[in-house]
Amino acid sequence: MNDFLEFSKQLLLEPAIVIGILVGIGYYLSKKGPIKIITGAISAMVGLELILFGGSMFTSTFKPIVTAVSDHYGITGYLMDPYAMRASTQEALGANFSFVGYVFLIAFFVNLILVFFGKYTKAKGIFLTGNTGIAHAQAILWLTSYWLGLNWLVTTIIAGVLLGIYWAIATTVPINAVKKVTNNGGFTIGHNQMFGIWFFSKIAGFFGNPETDDAEKLELPGWLGIFNHNVTAIALIMTVFVGGFLLSIGPSNIQELAGEQHWLIFIFYLGIKFSMYMVILLQGVRMMVGEINQSFKGIQEKVIPNAVPAVDVAALLPFSANAATLGFIFTTIGTVFSMMVLVLIKSPIMVLPGFVPLFFSGGPIGVVANKYGGYKSVIVCCFLLGIIQSFGTIWAIGLSGLPDGIGWTGMFDWSTVIPLFTELLKLIARILTLGVYA
């Protein structure tokens, strides 16, 4: 039994394998031949792996830059980064960290059950982003145990059920927005900003016109026409943006990051790499979306009506590469603005942005904002996103009960919805005199 549970946990932690199995099942139910089943499943797996690879390369390339700038200016505080939250919750759980896998499994099956009975629950999304799901399981297990203080078996069951309900609701909420952005791509998002995608899809239209202000259709005159080419525009914009960011710490410090490469060449290649990773993401999305679109009809018609796979948020980025870049830039600006406000008001908590909440919230929400309101909406929405994530992280940290000086994920849902959920746990604990109130 333990071997089966361990196998199931490891299988679900590999989203590419899960997607491949589902695509294969979909083609089988659609009565496709074995060649199509095999090629379709493998194409979907390779596509998702390209998306995950591109996303991980963004993070590994730019995370040291953010760290170097923070160190140079002597800024200390809580880090807004999903890896920081994973580290802090793992430390807090200690020996009880072993329960996290069971929380994940319970949550996944609760999610499936709610989607299976979607006629009554209205749930459609199936959360398939394994690594993100484990981070969620860690955090929800810790928050449940901290505030309710029940035995670990009961806590694990409660945390798993709560997380499964959250996944079912949160992956369903952005379905219409994702469908519009991807031209009915056949998937939804399972990550850390699902409610954020829905929220900004609702307000983006107030700030611009997607017909006249589409970031992908901006025709610049004269020599500026070079920016009409996506790959070139992204490379040049990111070279200037990241270069300006780095120049504030001085050439000698940039040279430390660059190693043996000259610091000017290092800056230029950062822009090139950024554009290259976007191309990788684009190819991955094309492969995965094409197979999901064709295959999932079999699953929807014969097994789980209206089920929609929820995949990594990076799948949205290539649908408007210019908007994703603008979204990242203005989320960063909104976050820096928030840090300045925190300094002015002498906040006891300072939050430092990691690359992940800046790009993997700012980029996708920039894509959504562009679809509903054009580039002007991207600017407003992503600046607002930077503020929400910063101050929402302070709210979340104040409720987390975690050790000082580590961090929280900082992304939209975990700066809004999850702190609100934690307030409810706190209220229940107070009423029933549980946990810290016992």
Image (cartoon, helix red, strand yellow):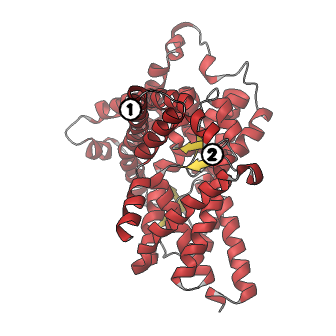
State left or right for residue 417 relative to residue 284.
right
| Amino acid at circle 2 | Ile
Q: Count neighbours of disc 2 (C-alpha within 10 A) and say few if under 14, some if 14 to 19, many if 20 or more.
A: some
Counting from the top left corner in percent of width and height, residue 277 is at 40, 32
Q: Residue furthest left?
A: 260
Q: Is residue 77 visible?
A: no
Image spot of residue 44 (x, y percent): 44, 34
Camera-side residue: 386 or 427?
427
> Residue placed at 44% from the left, 24% from the top?
236
Question: Is label 1 in a helix, a strand or a loop?
Answer: helix
Q: Secondary structure at mark 2?
A: loop
Between the residue at mark 1 and the residue at mark 2, the CA separation in whole angstroms equals 22 Å
Instruction: Looking at this view, name the residue that lies furthest to the bottom.
Output: 438
Label drawn at residue 304: 2
Q: Quadrant of the C terminus?
A: bottom right
Quarter of the figure with residue 416: bottom right
Above or below — where is 356 with respect to 186? below
Quadrant hosting residue 261: top left
Residue position marked by numbered label 1 in the rendering:
38
Compared with 306, 75 (above or below) is below
